[in-house]
Amino acid sequence: MSVDSCVDFRPDDASRIDTRTANVALSLNSLEQRHRPVAILPQRIKVLKEVGKFNLLIVEKGPSFKSRSLKLVLLTIVCGMILTLIYAPTVYNDRQPRSSSRFGEVGWIWDRTKFDPRYVSSLDIQWNDISKALENLHPAKGKLEIGLLNFNFTEFGHWKQMYPNTDLSVIRLDRAEKSVTWAKLYPEWIDEEEETKIPACPSLPEPEFRLGSQFDLIVVKLPCSKSGSWSRDVARLHLQLSAAKVAVASSRSTSPVHVLVVTDCFPIPNLFPCKYLARREGNAWLYKPDLSTLREKLRLPVGSCELAVPLKAKARLYSVRRRREAYATILHSADAYVCGAIAAAQSIRQAGSRRDLVILVDESISGEHRAGLESAGWKVRTIRRIRNPKARQDAYNEWNYSKFRLWQLTDYDKVVFVDADLLVLRSVDFLFAAPEISATGNNASLFNSGVMVIEPSNCTFGLLMEHVHEITSYNGGDQGYLNEIFTWWHRIPRRMNFLKHFWEGDSEAAKAQKTRLFAAEPPVLYVLHYLGMKPWLCFRDYDCNWNADIYRQFASDAAHARWWRVHDGMPENLRKFCFLSTRQKAALEWDRRQAEQANFSDGHWRRSIRDPRRGVCVEKFCSWESMLLHWGETNWTGASTVQVQGQVQVQANPSL
């Protein structure tokens, strides 16, 4: 008899059942209430006992039953037995407590009535790969104790066959509420100042398992829908965090705890770092995590819905391995940011930090500029550039994947990356106690990579390089790519990477507040990040972003003046790296004339220029006035010239 036949009743059949069969129905209900998912053998005995009761009941009432009704009752009983046996939770052994042994609380397969497709993994497990991955895994004593998370009935049978002499248990996990979306875990904005409310993250159900369990191995199977945004999947995150929590709860001094992640897509790289990857066979990733480090990560908010580094902390945590920590930045393809990098180094030292300063440069940076960077305090390291395979030739983002080289700074445990176009106004040394990736929010669910905490690792560098052809950056640059790799990032206050930007939606009060923050003495902001045209590429008299329509959103004389105060604190021999090129002087005058023609209401274009650099020439050709005679004309290549970040480039997009 097939299972389908058990539900193939006709209405007229049901109507013919004698009312006296109600006793049978009640007995069936009592059977369902008594059913508990314990070991399969006791269950089968229970079922047989109940069937005996049914037979007795039917014999006693037999004379009053019609033949057809009797057949229907028998069919109902048999169907109940079959369905009970099919869905019997054999995955629970008799050592599991009743409180954690209901189908609906184990995973997607165990209770069809609570089926949740978010947790379903369609991966066809390669059992030979799992066997190879675990071949060197042995318990310190006794049986190997294994906890399984998100495996179905058939897969449990495979585990039982492969490892008959192990103690297998199922880890119970209620599913997250469907209202908990990625946007709830990673909102674009939270009230960091706690002006109206204290930010709070949604809760995810905790894993539950037998009290006193000390697993040698936790195995979790993850969903991975490559057709969608698999790396921003609530169920996938929930399962990995749960596996990590069970691992930490199972920690003991006598033997290590391993985590086996079974998945098509790579696990969260900053929850299960590849430096703790003991072995990988196909889709089986075996980790031997550092449990103390993992424990600290699990204390973090589940997403960017709360601050991982508090803004108003009375005391800050600082790491103790200062010699293994450094600030780092990178210059490639052009020397226009040398002045900015020198100013950034000066600001870090003025803020009181004594950590190492490391700058990565490619061969396009001249020896003279390298010497200037070293004089400013940077330890200069030469790198080979990394091309963005999806960028056009000579585009602004062609070589920005060179930033991945930061993960090769393996002589440091922690690196705080800082863009070369920012100033550190207050010490952020406490960020070295933060995990990878800690950063400020950018937009939507994304982080800004201008300031971020990373943990150098050659295998993480390998992971970044492995997927450059597969993963598309949302903005074509390194920030977009890193956001696709490190989706589980941790929010730090925006004051630690405050963008010099007046958003279109900012009220006049919000704009005034930003201006006060830019100028505040002593500083309120920790880091001020200069977007748009850079201060050293403007005349010091005012922010030249005022004169270019597309850059006016980045204009602030208060922020501009602050950068120049840091410049004025530089040694005289370093200021020469901030001189203006002849071409840049022409570009600034061209923008001023365009602003005059447009009659911009702010009137900056009317101001006289007193910056002494205007009269200093560091090139053979010094007549910027002559350049203006043909400014904006089509050049000899047939392409029109476009001004980008204060330099004349061909076919480039403005970088912020």
Image: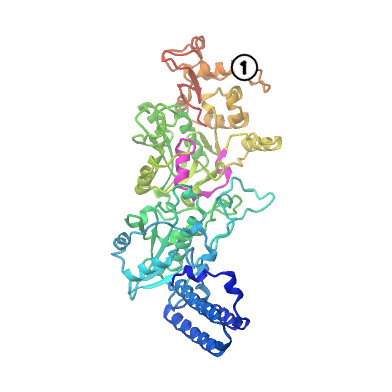
| Number of numbered labels in the structure image | 1
Amino acid type of the residue that numbered disc 1 sits on in the rendered structure: Ser
Counting from the top left corner in percent of width and height, residue 288 is at 36, 61
State the image quarter where residue 86 is shown.
bottom left
For the N terminus, give its image quadrant.
Answer: bottom left
In depth, the one of 94 and 167 nearer the eye is 94
Magenta segment: does it hold 61?
no
Q: Report if residue 186 is visible in the image.
A: yes
Relative to residue 501, is residue 601 depicted above or below? above
In depth, the one of 505 and 616 nearer the eye is 505
Neighbours of disc 1 within 10 Å: few (<14), some (14-19), many (20+): few
Relative to residue 476, is residue 587 depicted above or below? above
Q: Report if residue 354 is visible in the image.
A: no
Counting from the top left corner in percent of width and height, residue 42 is at 44, 82
Relative to residue 470, is residue 211 depicted above or below? below
Q: Dot 1: what SS?
A: loop
In depth, the one of 383 and 206 nearer the eye is 206
Counting from the top left corner in percent of width and height, residue 176 is at 55, 60
Which residue position holds label 1?
A: 608
Q: Which residues are magenta?
A: 474-498
In depth, the one of 345 and 509 nearer the eye is 509
The residue lying at 48 percent from left, 40 percent from top is 480
Magenta segment: does it hold 483?
yes
Q: Name the colour scheme.
A: rainbow
Counting from the top left corner in percent of width and height, residue 602 is at 67, 23
Residue extending farthest to the front is 67
